[in-house]
Image: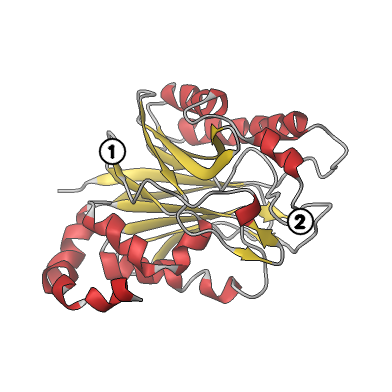
Amino acid sequence: MSDIVRCGIIQCANPINDESRPVAEICEAMMVKHEALIHEAGRKGVQILCLQEIFNGPYFCPSQDPRWYEAAETVPGPTSNRVAEICKQYDMAVVVPIYERAMRGVYFNTAAVYDADGTYLGKYRKQHIPQVAGFWEKFFFTPGDGGYPVFQTRYGKVGVYICYDRHFPEGARCLGLNGAEIVFNPSATVAGLSQYLWKIEQPAHAVANGYFVGAINRVGTEAPWNIGKFYGTSYFVNPRGQIVAEGSEDNDELVIADLDFNMIDEVRNTWQFYRDRRPDAYDEINRR
């Protein structure tokens, strides 16, 4: 019997590339731009939606400017709740990646997860934080402290892995072991060094763990940092490693795929990676 879930992902360019404008104004402009695409997802019957990394603003980590701490808010909070209220109109579960202020001076790169009735289910905090030229994320983010939770929505079990996390297979496996049927990876990735990995790592995670992946990347070039072009090409990949829907490199876009979660059973009954894995033989991973 078919168990098809209509999933959507949104890629979007920042509409205000002007550092002289207030942070709140920049974030509101990005929010308003997303609202039209969120409503489009609802009208088209999307059941689970995911937005891009820190969706309601630019990717500000090329700087080390403390003014961007102003973009952080509680989770759940006004922006994530605002998105959830829109999605509730359409019975649509949603993953809302946002900059979280956990307490004074402590910030996380976070994704809030809401069910189709607007119920807040919990959050994932990005575990792996890069610190290289153009990606000064340790200036803005504390490493995640909440493990690899999986959220039971009305339509399926959802996991989240954020951007740089995707380079680490350990967390991807934890999400599978915790029951994820689809894992969303909201990202902010520019053309260059890691682009060749974009369509290798996440299909590999899908195959190794027997689940679907929704990979989201923003589009456009963001001033004043101009670290490169965010190349979009957001996509869905199935447990066989096949890309089944893909966005463009340049456009604001809603990418939709009808995913048959019964494929998870078909693939796992063929490739018994969970049965044949040997956690008793992996102790050396934890010693290094």
Residue 103 visible here: yes
Circle number at residue 44: none
Quarter of image, res 122: top left
Residue at the image point whose x is 76% and y is 29% from the top: 25
The amino acid type, in three-letter code, at marker 1 is: Tyr
Q: Is residue 280 above or below residue 116?
A: below
Pick whichever, 270 or 189, lies toward us.
189
Does 89 sit left or right of 193 as displayed? left
Residue at which label 2 appears: 221
Tag 1 residue? 155
Q: Where residue 28 sits in the image (x, y, percent)? A: 70, 29
**Would residue 271 be found to the left or right of residue 78 on screen?**
left
Residue drawn at (67%, 68%) of the image: 191
Q: Is residue 287 above or below residue 219?
A: below
Q: Secondary structure at mark 1?
A: loop
- For label 2, count other residues whose C-alpha is less than 10 Å away and answer few (under 14), some (14-19) or many (20+): some
Locate the C terminus by quadrant.
bottom left
